Each structure stands twice: as C-alpha cells, then as structure tokens.
Image (tube, rainbow, N blue to C red):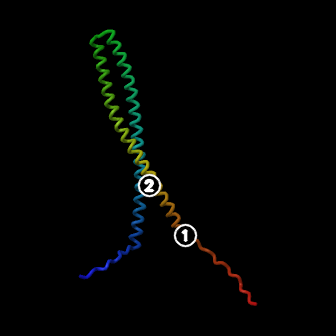
Amino acid sequence: MAVKKKTRSSVSSNKSLQSVDDAISTLANAAASTSKAVIDITKNKKKLLAESKRLAKKLATLMKKKKAAKAALNKDSSATNRKALKTIEKDISVNKKEAAKITAEKSLAIAELSTLKIVSKRATVYAKALASADKTLNKPKRKRRKKKRAAKVIS
C-alpha cells in the first residue's frame, strides 16, 4: 500500500485577511450589542425597582388600614366592618402576590445585568485595543534621510 504524503494546506492572504476582518467586526458587533443590552436591562431594572417601591408603600398603607379596621371591628362588630376588613385583607394578599412576582423578576434582572456588564466591559476593552493596534499598524512608514558620509581624506 502506498502511503499518501501529508500536504500542508496553504492559506491565501485574502482568506487570512478576510478572517481577521470578520473577527474584528464580530467583536465590534458583540461590544455594541452587549452595551445595548446593558442599557435595556438597566431601564427594566429601574422600572422594577420603582414598581417594588410603589407596592411596598401600598402594603404599608393597607396594613395601617387593616389595623384601623380591626379596631373598628372590636368596637362595633357589624357586617360592614367585617366586610371592610375582609376586602382590606384581600387587597393585602393580592399586593403580596404582585410583590413576589416583581421580586423574582428583579433578582433575575440584577443577575443578568451583572453578567452582561462584565461581558460588555471585556468586549469594549478588546475592541478598543484592536482599534489602537490597527491605528498603529496602518501608520505610513517614515521616510528616513540618508546620513551624509564624511568625505574621505586622501593623504
């Protein structure tokens, strides 16, 4: 049996140039998309924080109303007072369910945001480094003057 010789696959300059350019553009796109995602998730996180604050305030006012309703029920145990207390308790349970949902969403957003910030930072730093390296490599060559030779003295 004849054994085939392994031949090296030569890479053309066009292919290598294209692959380098593709890699640079991919990195630039990744940096842009991660920074955009960071902005979007930050906005979402702010909305969730505001909603969480609103629900906390609402819960505090409902708790005060519940305390007042219980006091009114202890003084006069009429049907209207019992009904008022039950509606307040229903509102509290609805509020707590909403707060639990928002807390879960908020924690997911915070975890995602921290990871995205790290990735975005890396991508932008690499993109900046490549840009500065490209700038350095693309500088025109300096033309150097030839040194004047000292005239030979024949003695």
Is residue 114 shown above or below 90?
below
| Residue 104 coordinates in the image, percent (x, y) | 34, 37
Left or right of 73 on screen, residue 29: right
The one of 128 and 104 positioned closer to us in this rendering: 104
**Dot 2: within a 10 Å radius of its alpha carbon, few (fewer than 14), some, or many (20 or more) residues?**
many
Mark sitting on residue 130 = none
The one of 150 and 111 positioned closer to us in this rendering: 111
Left or right of 93 on screen, residue 13: right
Check the picture and name the quadrant holding the C terminus.
Answer: bottom right
Mark sitting on residue 123 = 2
Residue at the extreme front of the image, as rendered: 1
Residue located 41% across and 34% down the image? 50
Residue located 59% across and 73% down the image? 143
| Residue 88 coordinates in the image, percent (x, y) | 32, 21
1 or 2: mark nearer the eye: 2
The one of 12 and 43 positioned closer to us in this rendering: 12
| Residue 84 coordinates in the image, percent (x, y) | 30, 17
Check the picture and name the quadrant holding the N terminus.
Answer: bottom left
Residue located 36% across and 35% down the image? 103
Residue 3 sits in which quadrant?
bottom left
Mark sitting on residue 140 = 1
User: Please, what is the three-letter code of the amino acid marked with disc 2?
Assistant: Ala
Residue at the extreme top of the image, as rendered: 76
Residue at the extreme bottom of the image, as rendered: 155
Q: Secondary structure at mark 2?
A: helix
Residue 108 sits in which quadrant?
top left
User: Please, what is the three-letter code of the amino acid marked with disc 1?
Assistant: Pro
Choose the circle earlier in sequence order: 1 or 2: 2
Residue located 38% across and 42% down the image? 109
Q: Secondary structure at mark 1?
A: loop
